Image (cartoon, rainbow, N blue to C red):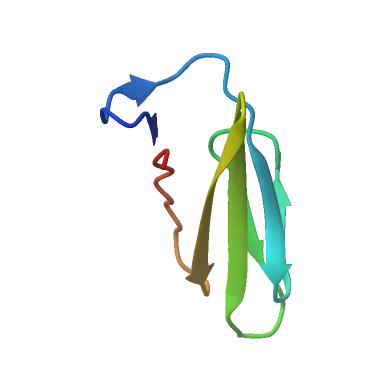
Amino acid sequence: MARDRARRTIDTDLAFAWRIVEGDAKLDRADAQIVAFHAGSEPGLVRVEVVVPEPGRACRAEGQLTRMILALVVVAD
């Protein structure tokens, strides 16, 4: 869930860009607020990043995971 500097929930006009930074995995719907993570066939650590652009800047969050559920909270700087 995205929040602004005042910690208010933002739920309209957001664009998301998810990507695998490192590791063997896939993401479904890399442009959605919530994505499905599909781990590779071998155990290992995966780094995932999401970027949410705003006028004049972009908010970014990164997480590391294995075969678990990932939730990232993006907070504007």
Quadrant assignment for the N terminus: top left
Say which residue appears at 50% left-offset and 71% top-offset.
65
Q: From the top left corner, tell me how far across and down residue 14 is, in percent.
A: 57, 23
Q: Quadrant of residue 58?
A: top right
Q: From the top left corner, tell me how far across and down residue 72 is, in percent.
A: 43, 51
Q: Is residue 60 left or right of residue 15?
A: left
Quadrant assignment for the C terminus: top left
Residue at far bottom of view = 43
Q: Closest to the observer: 52 or 48? A: 52
Q: From the top left corner, tell me how far across and down residue 29 is, in percent.
A: 71, 39
Say which residue appears at 70% left-offset and 42% top-offset.
30
Name above or below for residue 46 compared with residue 63. below
Q: Closest to the observer: 73 or 43? A: 73
Q: Closest to the observer: 16 or 76? A: 76
Total marks shown come to 0
Residue at far front of view = 56
Q: Is residue 61 left or right of residue 52?
A: left
Say which residue appears at 61% left-offset and 73% top-offset.
46
Q: Closest to the observer: 58 or 48? A: 58
